[in-house]
Image (cartoon, helix red, strand yellow):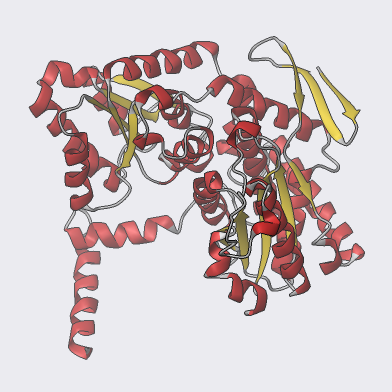
Amino acid sequence: MITEMLLGTESVIILKTERTGLSLEKKLMVSLCEKNARSFVTEEAFVIMKQRAIAGQDLLWSGKGPGAEYLGWLDLPESFAESDLEKIETTAEEIRNTSDVFVVIGIGGSYLGSYAAISFLRHRFYNNVPRSLRQGPEIYFAGNHFSGRYLKELIEVIGERDVSVNVISKSGSTMETAVAFRFFRQYLEDRYGREEAVRRIFVTTDATQSPLKDIAEESGYCLLGIPSNVGGRFSVLTAVGLLPIAVSGGDIRTMLDGASAMRAHLLREKDCNDALIYAIYRNLFFEQGKTVELMACCDPCLHHLAEWWKQLFGESEGKNHLGLFPAAVDLTTDLHSLGQFIQDGSRIMFETVVRITEHRADEAVVVTESLDDFDGLNDLSGMTMDEMNAKAFYGSTMAHTDGGVPNLLLSVPNKNADSLGQLFYFYEYACGISGYVLGVNPFDQPGVEAYKRNMYALLGRKGYEEERRRLLERLQETDRLQ
């Protein structure tokens, strides 16, 4: 049951969720403003692209498009089993009670979502403040590269403190993650003994089959499943993201409720919703020759959300020599390094600016008055830094638009779990539509396998002997020419 009302200019959804059976009233806080983009497209082009986007949206809900076997995320906020959610919460509480440090081992979709959520929801200096302020263990991420130095230095950071690890891999065989897990499993067994190490290892992998699932069941590790119909980059609202977020003290139930509210709104407003409009503009600008979408974040807490967003769209759309290149900047930080190019460089991009519009009064920092006015800023005394940031936002978006860079604005009024759940679902939904409009399968990643095949061959793995021979010949020829 979904009812929608208007309170002023804000949309409010009242819905009864299948997962909780409770009636929830929510302000639909995440909204898209297109006023700084509309003048860059014709009405005729917009109408034609909207028809294509609605067709792409219909493919999502009908399950008849490419990659339909990976559409489990569409209903995930509603279909999440209460027993699975309780297991995540119980497991997180166990980790919080027994560990000073928690290491999340994963790469790509196996860690970017939880990293984004912890950075958004928790203290900006989470690992550096006293435990009384962060209310959980320090959280570090590993298994997303091949740096041995990083692992050794992380062990130095852990020191004598108690540690648990969560290895996350849907396939169970991702090499960066597997190598790091071997390292930490041996470290835990050497330090605690095998029996205690078992209690400090938590495995998140495909719910039906994977090498990690097998080793978890054989060894007695706590096992959390990833639905087989949810791809890695769409898995933040599964145990992949929810366990680390819960360990940090994040409210995962409210996150799921936020995603449910967004899903309900998008489902009701199929003919015209903000995710649909976002997908329309992305493809319109691509057809105009724009090759880069620049996500501009107006608050440091959004930085890692942009990293998650980059994988979501880059891996979903970058196929068949198509797709926008997803890049990100932090405002106003990067206006002092990339602002000149954005304003006056080659016109290859458009911006999607993400802004939190409401701020807590107890977090405000006010510009003070100086007796000697050494920097000439006394005329700003009494103004908060949030007010200054808002003026910088308006100034930069107007300047960029005037300079020929179309701007979309995604407004997020609150820095909370409800808003974040909405954001995650908004982007996943828009990504599915946008990929179908572009004409690609948004749910596979065939290009990722190319570097893996070369890497396996050069490492001398079994079954790659012929590829290894050819690659070594190429390397030798390169060395000779140099």
| Residue at 61% over, 35% down | 415
Q: Position of residue 101 (x, y in %)?
A: 28, 29
Q: Is residue 399 left or right of residue 7?
A: left
Could you say which is closer to the camera, residue 232 or residue 194?
194
The answer to whether residue 458 is visible is yes
Q: Residue furthest front?
A: 371
- Percent coordinates x, y for residue 375 in the rendering: 57, 65
Residue 347 makes an appearance in the image = no
Can you say whether 214 is above or below 142 in the image?
Answer: above
Q: Quadrant of the C terminus?
A: bottom left
Question: In terms of depth relative to the viewer, which is nearer, 159 or 406?
Answer: 159
Q: Residue, x 61% and y 57% (percent of image)?
A: 296
Q: Is residue 152 above or below residue 446?
A: above
- In the picture, which quadrant includes the N terminus? top right
Residue 361 picture location, percent across and down: 65, 33
Location of residue 155 (image quadrant): top left
237 relative to 1 in the view: left or right: left
Residue 448 drawn above or below residue 366: below
- The residue under the point 57% across, 20% down is 253
Residue 306 in the image: state x and y as whole percent.
54, 50
